[in-house]
Image: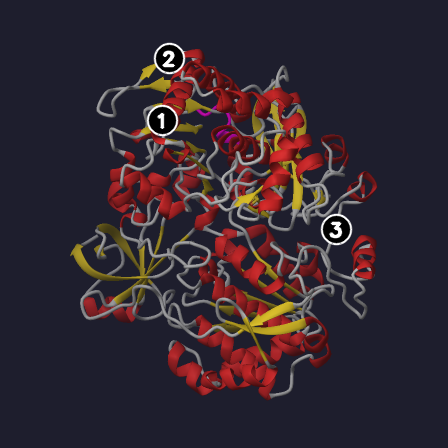
Amino acid sequence: AAQAADVEEWHPGVCRFCGVGCRVYLGLKKGKPVAIKGIPESATNKGYLCMKGMLFYRIIHHPERLTKPLYRERKDQPFREISWEEALRIAARKFAETVVKYGPDATAYYGSGQALTEETYLFQKIMRGGLGTNNVEGNPRLCMASAVGGYLTSFGADEPIGSYADIEKAYCFFIIGSNMAECHPVIFRRVMNRKFAKPNEVKVINADPRVSPTSRIADLHLQFRPGTDLALLNAMAYVIIEEGLYDQEFIQKYCKFKIGKPPKDVTFEEYKEFLKQYTPERAAEICGGNITPEKIRTAARWFATSKATMSLWTMGINQRSRGVWANNLIHNLHLLTGQLCKPGADSFSLTGQPNACGGVREGGGLCHILPAHRPVKIDKLRHQVEDLWGIPRGTIPPKPGYHTIAMFRAVNQGKIKALWVNCTSPAQSLPNCDFYRKGLAREDLFLVVTDIFPTKTTELANLVLPTAFHFEKTGVYGCTERRSQLTVKVVDPPREAKPEVWIVREWALRMAEEFERLGDRRRAENLRICVKPFLGKEEGYELPKAIWEEYTQKLTKGRDNDLSGATYEVLKQRPDGVQWPAPTKEHALKGGTYKKFVRGIDPLAEEEGRKLGISGPYVFYGPAHKDHKLYLWLRPYKGAAEEPDAEYPFYLSTGRVIDHWHTSSMTGRIPELLRANPYAYVEINPKDAARLGIKPNDMVEIETRRGKIVLPAKVYEGPIQGMVFIYWHDMAEERMANRVTKDAFDPGSKEPEFKICACRIRKVSGP
Ligand code: SF4
């Protein structure tokens, strides 16, 4: 906005970075991007932006952008520039030959929550409907898969019930495992505004092993030993029941208690008995840190007795080897107290990326889910998709593909021979990344990367394809609150960069020819059927529009994320997008559904509730659990996969800072952001630093069982004693955090435990 005075024209769109989904105007001068400003009428950000959002226009036409297809036959050769025709033919030939020689599961696609919905949808359609493999994954597996698992097991349906609009109606915020102030800064600002508008009425509880900028507005900071929050959450439930703070009517009407796998019903009495191992006294012992029984009691009382409580969480809960259980235990607190389905009350997971929800979670971008939340293993739903695409039944296999860690292990083992990575950099973002880089470097792996800048992953590629960036192409982003927002192309991409939807369509057409040549008529025909609706469409607007229409009109129709009313025309008329479900144009034009399940606010929900014969103050509808109940789960405390020991005595936790985004391939190229935060450091508690003779800015080696990195020390009362914290954005080889993280993952969600592993530290030199 600094150069806003120069702007000649403003164009509306969405921020390219985090999952908040801020609405922005891009400012042009003489056709060149020169400024960004927030849109004051926006439902998501009300005009606010963080620095990343204000500066992303600098990436458009950045001098280091990839602008020509690059190819090398062998990975020890230099890249050479080639034409698009040659590039598409090479990619088509390598994938088709791999399928014919090794079978479709020797190919894979790895995408991103930063890709547009149309891009993810088309990639997965080609992989599944064309090639016949479910090896379709995306980096949202690394950040929100446990939230999906939590919603599905507790509520029977994915994604939050409520909206950001609940923030202005809440009286208690329970922020756990989230440094919102840096990771979702604009939503945090709304929390702050609410808090400071009603300082005596609104309480903020922050539960985190580290004092972060988020903790600074907390009325109560629960600082526990990493990984012990399952005990803390169970103890809060214990207090709620012991002190009679639960909502008996809500529980009786709408809830069941469940244990184990396969799930078994248990009674409320059995749940109470289970919780006896988590008295506040016992939990305080497990949790350590500053946790006392009285703090646990206070948190439980505030949570249960406020007029409306909203929980907010993200990676600290999700990136864990028991991430799904931790999600369940947060939902339990809402179900026990009835803090749900009323204005201001919600169990609301925050999503990291701008389109992790809309594109990957909803658009079919994970190995086990087809578009519109259809589990691939359910025959009826799989056949529905095949029928809607017009391909023969049996084309899509019933078995889910490789989840992220399994996919890259398969790469290491040589089982995957052709991999397409889009808009993400697994060579840096995977846990234990040195191990997986060995696989990506294999000569028998044909690696295609589509991206806007060189990354750690393009370094290992055979074929690098330059793509259009934000505002250089058209498409939809679906943010954390079920809201789809359209961004329309405003400027041309630099030189030969192309939108992914064009790349995929052209690749698929050429693959059809290759399969024909190789004698696989069935695949050739399926590929042609898959791309037929998109032939002849102009790439800047018509093509993504046709893809969006197919996805929403055919695939989401009648599903819980029904977006069939949200056409491009409607989205253009709705400056702040549409929240699903929005099954009709009229409904979409009103903005869609504020709460999925609340009576009296959304007439559609009310009508659905009536159909299901559910009465009372709340209405649940949609594909929730078949019995229309919400489940409280008995989940015991379990620590991290790798706890500190005598050899590696510290907890190592990783996270983010406000100035950077993921692997910093973009923010690291914006001078203002780089100056604000030029390199990673290790945060150490002063007591630990004193014991080890470490002073501020000393160089410190952080060593785990995976490897070592060296970072300057930041000594302050942030991390709890016995824990160190590093941010993972830095792409310098010697400071890359994921060289030391562990690739253990949650058995249900398969999300890796980036948040906790064991390390040792030592000073290696002075400042
Ligand atoms: Fe962009 Fe997120 Fe910042 Fe909003 S809060 S401007 S979406 S990075």
> What amino acid type should be assigned to the residue bearing mark 1?
Thr
Residue at screen point 27% across, 58% down: 696
Residue 82 numbered tag:
2
Q: Is residue 215 visible?
A: no
Tell me the element at label 2. Answer: loop
Nearest to N terminus: mark 2 or mark 1: 2
Quadrant of the displayed image that contains ligand 1: top right
The magenta-colored residue range is: 57-62
Q: Residue 415 sits in which quadrant? A: top left
Within 10 angstroms of label 1, few (less than 14), some, or many (20 or more) residues? some
Residue 98 numbered tag:
1
Residue 593 numbered tag:
3
Tell me the element at label 3. Answer: loop
Q: Residue 336 sits in which quadrant? A: bottom right
CB within 8 Å, label 2 to label 1: no
User: In the rendering, at what x and y percent does residue 578 appear?
Assistant: 72, 43
